[in-house]
Image (cartoon, rainbow, N blue to C red):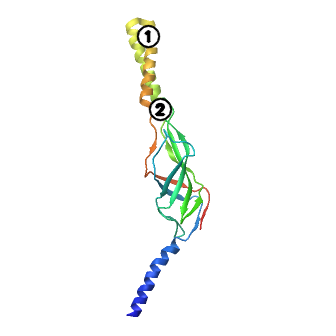
Amino acid sequence: MNSRIRAFSAFLVLLLVVPAFSHAGGTVPVGTHISVVTDQAVSSKEAKIGQSVTGSIAHDVIVGGKVVIPKGSEVKLTVSGVQASGRLSTPAKLYLRLRTVTVKGKTYTVATNSAGRTEKGKGKRDAGFIGGGAAGGAAIGALAGGGKGAAIGAAAGAGAGTAGAAATGKKNIEFPAETRLTFTTRADIAIK
């Protein structure tokens, strides 16, 4: 009976010790993909370059069969690129960069690429609104008053088209809380 208790106790000790060794530091090499989940929302309309955003590691970062950065480890991100959507042809953009990761109470600086997105430009669509408005105005003006009416109608139509493009234009980017972003390391990270 005692041998069974000793064997069971040894088995329990192994269950507790092996995970501790599997989380024993290491070096995360350059080019490693690190997936992060944000804890808070950030928007291209309100964000500022350098603004901090908190998050956590989405998946264990495993190197050589060992978990070097466990899932759930806290991270700090910064806004590395931002532009609010303009009324006409300025597309919104929002990019974040992973700056630090905290493992077992120790914070490590991380160098990564930026992750995010840029909205597609609206220049061609806006030009279509403006050009279409001008053409429509010219046609109506020509019917109503000939050459001079066509010129007045074209100007009025272009103005209406510009107003329509501006009114339909703004489309900002928002990353809500729990947005998943993947970063690639640009330098080794020695986790101890």
Q: Is residue 25 left or right of residue 162?
A: right
Q: Which quadrant does the C terminus fall into? A: bottom right
Residue 188 found in image quarter = bottom right
Q: Residue at coordinates 45% horizontally, 78% vertically from top-left? A: 15
Would you call the spot at circle 2 few (<14 residues within 10 Å), some (14-19), or many (20 or more)?
A: some
Amino acid type at circle 2 is Lys
Task: Tell me the SS state at disc 1.
Answer: helix
Residue 87: x %, y % from top left: 48, 29
Q: Is residue 141 above or below residue 85?
A: above
Q: CA distance from mark 2 to mark 1?
A: 28 Å
Would you call the spot at circle 1 few (<14 residues within 10 Å), some (14-19), or many (20 or more)?
A: many
Q: Which quadrant does the N terminus fall into? A: bottom left
Q: Is residue 131 above or below residue 92?
A: above
Q: Residue at coordinates 45% horizontally, 21% vertically from top-left? A: 131
Residue 119: x %, y % from top left: 48, 39
Amino acid type at circle 1 is Ala
Residue 53: x %, y % from top left: 51, 50
Please give the residue where the numbered disc 1 appears in the rendered image: 150
**Mark 2 or 1: the one toward you:** 2
Q: Residue at coordinates 43% horizontally, 47% vertically from top-left? A: 176
Say whether marks 2 and 1 touch (CB < 8 Å).
no
Please give the residue where the numbered disc 2 appears in the rendered image: 122
Task: Tell me the SS state at disc 2.
Answer: loop
Q: Earlier in the sequence, mark 2 or mark 1?
A: 2
Q: 71 or 145, which lies in front?
A: 71
Q: 6 or 31, which lies in front?
A: 6
Indicate which disc residue 57 carries: none
Residue 54: x %, y % from top left: 50, 53
